[in-house]
Image: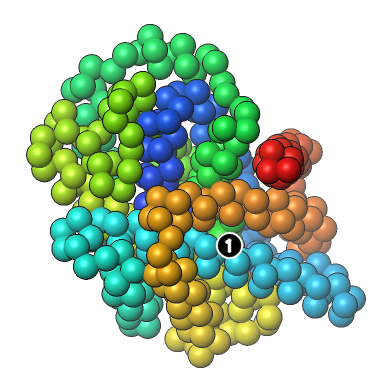
């Protein structure tokens, strides 16, 4: 059996600065009233990522390649390829800006040269790591740092003596209105990350090549459920610590005091640790986002998906460049991150619909084709996110 760790990479990819920031703002501003959106997002992520992994293992190809090949009509193939390039390109550029901004916030706490300048430096570091091809080793170190941050959040939650009664009361009173809709979309977008579907399919296609498909799918599913579930638990704990520090208090959360939620355990060093965690999470995600874009775009256009090929490098360099420009133009840091997550929430239905189509029409899937239950769950996810998007548009007008 292949030594596949793609489930953990997917979890590490969505536990980036966007997740930490979005969950912190959600907990600070809405307490546990939006936990329902997080729980939905976790289940939906498990369902969609299972489809993507199953597709990669069963066909030996990534999601973009499979999407391009679902029709023999040249016009439709061109249309599918164009939509993939547009959806993933726009989504990953927005997501990359959020990743770089989050990491820049962390570094700026140590040396105040401005988040825009740090975004340029971080973009150069990400590009250098991807160019070298040794990103996995670096990513492993950064994932350890993110896990260390998660441990501190867990310790803080219990050391601070959380008000379980208040949490349950708010959990039992879910909120969905014009005031919370952007935050709900952000929670969905930071958890069900569209580019992770492309990344997961490509990684499993490579890692399980030549293995028994049924056994590989079973192993991949177990790993993904555990890894994504643990990632969701981390997000929930971040929401809880922010709720205790800010919800119903006179202080409001901003880029300068997010680390306050860790003060019960870390005291004055809380802000520094939080900043280091944002940097670690941001650099990890700023590598995986352009990597996934390269797999998706190159697969859609029929180009080489070798990491050392010119087309592959050109795509991730473009994503990093756009991300740096967006992160450096002067948007408010937290607003930029929140916007990136909300944009992903709006782009998700496009990618999810494509995934459902290919999981039902690709003849090479055989026994691994979507069952009725998978289709129903997938359609529920798409319908819910579409309704959220329409509600958001209606609230604007």
Q: Secondary structure at mark 1?
A: helix
Q: Position of residue 235 (x, y in %)?
A: 40, 37
Q: x, y (%) of residue 256? A: 26, 47
Crowdedness of circle 1 by 10 Å Cα count: few (<14), some, many (20+)?
A: many
Q: Which corner quadrant of the image does residue 88 belong to?
A: bottom right
Task: Left or right? Give the position of 373 relative to 342.
Answer: right
Q: Nearer the viewer, residue 330 or 144?
A: 330
Q: How many marks?
A: 1
> In the shown orientation, is residue 355 left or right of residue 246?
right
Position above or below: 351 against 47: below
Q: Nearer the viewer, residue 231 or 359?
A: 231
Q: Is residue 139 visible?
A: no
Q: Is residue 256 left or right of residue 79?
A: left
Q: Is residue 329 above or below residue 261?
A: below
Residue depicted at 18% across the width and 44% down the height: 271
Residue 260 to residue 104: above or below: above
Q: Is residue 115 visible?
A: yes
- Residue at image x 40%, y 55%? 332
Spot the residue most to the left: 268
Q: Position of residue 238 (x, y in %)?
A: 34, 35
Residue at image point 28% right, 69% down: 118
Q: Which residue matches tag 1?
A: 91
- x and y, in percent, of residue 325 in the image: 45, 74
Kindly give the residue lying farthest to the bottom in the view shown: 310
Quarter of the figure that contains the C terminus: top right
Which residue occupies 37% across, 44% down?
20
Q: Quadrant of residue 361?
A: bottom right
Relative to the observer, which residue lies in front, 362 or 193?
193
How does the figure colour the protein chain or chains?
rainbow
> Which residue of the protein is positioned furthest toward the top in this rendering?
165
């Amino acid at each position: 059996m292949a030594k596949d760790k793609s489930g953990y990479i997917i979890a590490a990819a969505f536990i980036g600065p966007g997740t930490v920031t979005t969950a912190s703002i959600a907990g600070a501003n809405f307490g546990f009233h939006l936990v329902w959106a997080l729980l939905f997002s976790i289940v939906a992520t498990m369902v969609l990522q299972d489809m993507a992994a199953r597709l990669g293992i069963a066909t030996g190809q990534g999601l973009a390649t499979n999407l391009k090949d679902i029709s023999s009509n040249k016009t439709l193939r061109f249309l599918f390829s164009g939509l993939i390039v547009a959806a993933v390109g726009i989504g990953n550029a927005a997501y990359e800006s959020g990743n770089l901004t989050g990491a820049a916030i962390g570094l700026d706490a140590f040396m105040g040269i401005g988040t825009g300048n740090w975004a340029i430096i971080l973009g150069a570091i990400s590009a250098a790591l991807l160019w070298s091809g040794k990103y996995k080793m670096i990513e492993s170190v950064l994932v350890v740092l993110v896990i260390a941050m998660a441990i501190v959040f867990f310790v803080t939650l219990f050391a601070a003596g959380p008000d379980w009664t208040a949490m349950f009361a708010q959990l039992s009173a879910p909120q969905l209105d014009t005031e919370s809709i952007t935050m709900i979309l952000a929670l969905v977008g930071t958890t069900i990350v569209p580019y992770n579907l492309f990344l997961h399919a490509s990684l499993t296609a490579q890692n399980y090549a030549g293995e028994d498909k049924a056994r590989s799918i079973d192993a991949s599913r177990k790993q993904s459920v555990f890894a994504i579930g643990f990632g969701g638990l981390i997000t929930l704990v971040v929401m809880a610590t922010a709720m205790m520090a800010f919800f119903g208090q006179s202080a409001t959360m901003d880029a300068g005091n997010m680390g306050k939620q860790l003060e019960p355990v870390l005291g004055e060093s809380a802000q520094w640790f939080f900043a280091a965690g944002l940097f670690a999470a941001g650099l990890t995600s700023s590598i995986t986002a352009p990597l996934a874009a390269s797999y998706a775009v190159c697969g859609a256009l029929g180009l080489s998906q070798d990491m050392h090929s010119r087309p592959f490098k050109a795509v991730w360099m473009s994503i990093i460049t756009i991300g740096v420009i967006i992160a450096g133009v002067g948007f408010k840091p937290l607003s930029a991150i929140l916007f990136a997550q909300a944009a992903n929430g709006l782009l998700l239905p496009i990618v999810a619909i494509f995934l459902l189509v290919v999981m039902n029409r690709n003849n090479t899937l055989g026994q691994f084709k979507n069952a009725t239950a998978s289709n129903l769950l997938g359609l529920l996810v798409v319908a819910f996110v579409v309704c959220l998007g329409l509600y958001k548009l209606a609230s604007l007008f």
